[in-house]
Amino acid sequence: MTAALSIARNTFIESLRQPTIFVVVLVCGLLQYLTTAATGYSMGYRIYADGEVTGDDKMLLDVGMATVFVGGIILASFIATAALTREIDNKTVLTVVSKPIGRPSVVFGKFIGVTGAMAIASVILITQLLFAIRHGVMTTAADIIDWPAILFGAGSFALAGVFAAFVNFMYNWSFNQTFTLTLLPLHVGAYVLTLVFSDEWAMQPITTDLKPQILMACAALGGALMVVTGVAVAASTRLGQVMTIVACAGVFVTGLLSNHLLGKRAFQNDAFATIDEIVYERDDDVGLLDPGDEAVLTTEAPHEITLEIGMPIYFGPSPNGLGIAVPRFDPPGPDVDLENDLFPPEVPPALVITEVVGKDIRVKHVGGSPLDLRRAPEVGDFLFIQPTTLNPVFASVWAVVPNMHAFWLVDAVTQAAPIPLSHLGLIVVYALAQVGACLAIAVILFEGRDVG
């Protein structure tokens, strides 16, 4: 670890000196400003929705997060290739591996250093996004310009640039490194100071304009950038700069399409309707968790298939049966009295249809013991008449390919769906697992690489 940390320190410093960071931070900051002006008249007025972002600000958040995502991918690709590929091509890495330092230490050190530089750049990019969200889209001419956000945001950027230029001229310090390290605390401090004032310079509690759900979405996006950094480090052990960028872009695009290309084929089922309303027969039937419980499920549209009494029924949140909430069960035989509330022990537990009237489906929990439901049915769930089947080939590939949708929580924010901390924890675990796999591949590739 001592050798890896020493390599990480040098890589971190060299990464911050790359002009790519300054260019990407500058361009993304400009794009966030332009996005604030360009996303108006698209989603309606703010007063017609709830949540941390409403109206046109929904589009602002979506485009702004995409800007951070793409900017981070470009940074990861360029920084990783500069940290490893260039040293391999210039034979400078030979001076390191010729010493009693294992090649895994080199890979880990490079990754930690690049990740540190990426973390600083990502925080700056996210802070620029938060400034844009704080200002919001000016939907009408009556909207007030948020001068605190503009002055503090642009002022911190300008102050960092002036200071970096001064010390570069006077003391020959690296402009890019000084600018990045100076902008980080100035930008974050400027945003916190902006939260203290309203758009009319009135003092307010700091939590008034603070967006916790957006911060959680940004943290999840940081996990995606960490995974892309791992991919870039693994690719740079064998590929040049251009091909490393191509590899990162390929993983990114494949990760965005993995649900469409792989996920929908990994779990296979056919939904026949969607739940629009749930009415339980008795007050103590809530959840359909116990034998004898009944509920009437009203669907949004007429059923696509002919339903019969005694048919099994399943429900889940996905139209292809992923995450289905009802375990596989054996349907009761024709001799079982579905109207009975007390079933003998030999009757297997099941959820069956007892009546169909128009779009209303009466469902009953039958059996001599409870069916182990994962949860109660919810409005919006899809209905099925058979359990979900698993395709092991597509499921295995889908599990291995980094799924970028797992890190994209913008839809939850714009639809005012609270993001649980437990879900963010799962995203962190998933990101660490993907990074671990990327580093393992990087070590394997680098072990056999001729650097002499």
Image (spheres, rainbow, N blue to C red):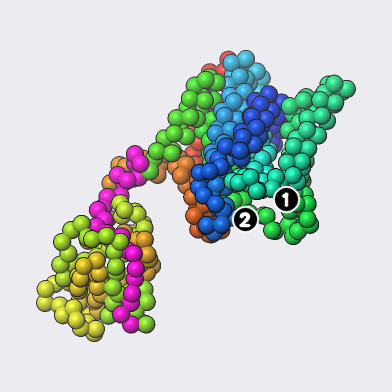
Whole-percent x, y for residue 70 in the image: 55, 34
Q: Nearest the camera: 341 or 431?
A: 341
Question: Magenta stretch: residue 265 in it?
Answer: yes
Q: Is residue 85 left or right of residue 256?
A: right
For the C terminus, the quadrant is top right
- Outermost residue on the left side: it is 335
Secondary structure at badge 1 equals loop
Q: Nearest the camera: 215 or 53?
A: 53
The quadrant in which residue 28 appears is: top right
- The residue positioned 53% from the left and 35% from the top of the image is 228
Instruction: Specify start and end residues of the magenta stretch as a single range.
Output: 260-282
Q: Which residue is mark 2?
A: 212
- The Cα atoms of the two marked residues, 1 and 2, are separated by 19 Å
- The residue positioned 34% from the left and 39% from the top of the image is 261
Q: Which residue is mark 1?
A: 199
Question: Magenta stretch: residue 199 in it?
Answer: no
Which numbered mark, 1 or 2, is in the foreground of this view? 1
